[in-house]
Structures are given as C-alpha cells and as structure tokens.
Image: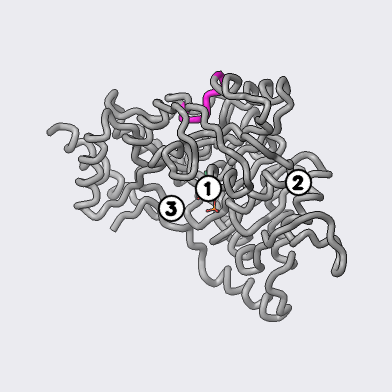
Amino acid sequence: MIPITKPFMPPIEEYQKFLEGIWEREYLTNNGPLVQELEVRLKEYLGVNNLLYVSNGTIALQIAIKALGLKGEIITTPFSYVATTSSIVWEGCEPVFVDIDPDTLNIDPELIETAITERTTGILATHVFGNPCDIDAIKKIANKHGLKVIYDASHCFGTTYKDRSVFSYGDISTTSFHATKLFHTIEGGAVFTDDDELNYRMRRMRNFGHAGFEQFDGVGINGKNSEFHAAMGIVNLNYIDSIFEKRKQQSLFYEKHLHRPEFQMITIQPNCDFNYAYFPVIFESEQVMLKVNRSLVNKGIVPRRYFYPSLGTLDYVINGNNPLADDISSRILCLPLYYELSEAEQELICQIILSEKKE
Ligand SMILES: Cc1ncc(COP(=O)(O)O)c(C=O)c1O
C-alpha cells in the first residue's frame, strides 16, 4: 500500500541511546532535560526568540487563544484542518468564516475587514499546506482594528517568510509536530511569540498555572510533553536537511509529470522559502477527483481529501458564505508524500492520474 504519508523513522539505535538516558535519570516528563534540549535546539534551528514545546498542535491553539484573552468572534478560515475551528469553539468563542484566495488557498485578507464587528477580538489564520498567508495585509488590518493575530502554522516547519521563520509572525504562532508532519515528535506541538510577557503566561498555562510547587499564577491546563517525545524530536532534527531535500525532489517530480492545465496546483507566496510539506492537486470537478481517487485506491494508493469538508459545514458553527472554500475543498486531493516514497511509486501515481484523465 502507498499511504498519503508515513512518519519519518530515524535509525532505532539513535533513539535507543536516548532511552538509556531516560532510564538512568528516571525522569519521564514535567519539563525534563530532553524537553529543554529540544526547545534550545529548535530555537537555534528556527532562529526564533521564544518557543514552548507542548503536547500537540491543538492544545497549542487553545493555549494561544486563552493567553491572548480572546472573546466573542474570531475571524478564521473555512479551509484548514478541523482543529483550527474546534479550538475556537472549545475556548468559548465564535468562529466567523471568511472565504479564501483560490490560488493560495489561504484566507483572503480583503474579505477580513468586511467581517469585523464590535465583537471581533482576533484573527486565526492558517498558512495552508505550509504556504504563508498575506502576512503584511493581515497585520495592517489587525493593527487598524486593534485585533490580535494567531497563525496556525501547523504545516510550516522550515518555511521562511521574508527571510525569517514563519513562526515568528503574528502575536502568537502555533505548530504541530504530529507524526504525519514533516518534522515530528510522534505527538507534539509548539507556541511561538516575540512577546516575553505572553511567553511567560503561556509557560505557566502549559503547566496547570504552576508558578512554583505550591503557587499558581492564572488558569492552566496540562499541555506538557514527555521526554520520550522530545527524544524523537532531537533525533529527527539531525535528519531535517535530507527530509526537506527529499520532499522538494518529490514535489518537483509531481509538478513536472502532472503539469497540465486541468490540474491546478497552489500558488506559493513569492516572499517565502517553501517547505514542500504537502502536494495538493485541485481537479476540474468533484466528479473527476472522485474518479481519480477511486482508481488510486483500487491500486492500493491512498491520497487524502485535505481539507474536506469545508469547515463552515461543521454542525457546531454558523455557516458563512464561503463559495470558494466549499468548491475547492470538494475537488482537492493531496498526493502521497513521505521520506521513503520512491520515484517508481510516484511514476505509478502519476500514470494512474493521467490515464483517468484520458477516459
Ligand atoms: C492546520 C492544522 N491545525 C491544527 C492541527 C492539530 O495538530 P495536532 O494533531 O498536533 O493536535 C493540525 C494537524 O493535524 C493541522 O493540520
């Protein structure tokens, strides 16, 4: 079978060395030495001022919303993974959807302003598939209306925007280090901010609000991660350059072989160094996409409908008018992309897609 993705698995001996250290120290979680080492190494690698390693990308979003004290309405995108919307609702806020740019698939900044009301407190935008939003336009609108900006940068490990890590933009950026992501720690995530005071608050929040053994400073949750997860991150970080290179070559292969007007590919932000995290293809219609999907599945190849359904259709939100997101999410398919995917396998995938098109 060729799945949509496979987690990167480093040599087992390298992970085992870290296990021996964990057994010696008998220190499994609660901001242990490996968590601290991972944070230092990631900060250096990404060139960011603050980074807090948390248990997953969903808790990262929830901590970000809580730390900024967002209430009322949060303007967001209907084209993202469900966690972007569900975190808003989980934190007691209302998602207000704004349609997307059909080329980048990111939230359309021109539509944000029309959706602002006196109840709007923030914007939660996703850099979809690792492709940065129009960060400058969003910042301008947020400043004008006194809104906070959170970026869901779950797909963005390694992406830079104007020569800086994309994680360094917005009041807070969040990411996911889930096993399906290009850089992973099995489960995991992080929050990023340049505001030291906000970082302090989120550090407390991640650990139940503890400010000492018997002291608390504000409400908190269990957002910590373990030494086992951090160890996987430290080992995987040693392989990150070859992971990026593989992804890039595989994406260029798909691009070259599927270069046809009937297959739309996303337009990458001009000011960014892209990480090739996903390879989405937008087909002419849902019917064509379903036909291609069926043929691939029949041959043991499993692409995924990222992102489907459009989030405005969830049963716990008020649906806005998002014709572009609804349309694109009905006919998009992400093709398999992972470290071990071979050129022969990619060739087979392209052949099946192209032969479906001929019929
Ligand atoms: C855009 C987006 N936001 C949030 C998440 C949630 O991350 P996690 O699975 O680490 O909780 C994901 C990942 O699956 C994602 O793709």
* Viewer-side label of 2, 3: 2
x and y, in percent, of residue 220 in the image: 74, 57
Please provide the residue range marked out in magenta.
104-110
The front one of 159 and 315 is 315
Question: Contact (CB < 8 A) between labels 2 and 3?
Answer: no
Badge number at residue 339 = 3
Residue at image point 55% right, 72% down? 13
Please tell me which residue is depicted at 81% across the width and 62% down the height of the picture. 210
Nearer-N-terminus badge (2/3) = 2
Residue receiving disc 1:
83
Q: Earlier in the sequence, mark 1 or mark 3?
A: 1
Q: Amino acid at mark 1?
A: Ala
**Label 3 amino acid?**
Tyr
Residue 157 visible in the picture: no
Give amino acid for label 2.
Answer: Asn
Q: Pointer 2: what residue?
A: 50
Give the label, 1 or 3, closer to the camera: 1
Cα gap from disc 2 to disc 3, whole angstroms = 29 Å
Residue 174: in magenta span? no
For this view, does 1 lie left or right of residue 279?
Answer: left
In the figure, residue 321 lies in which quadrant?
A: top left
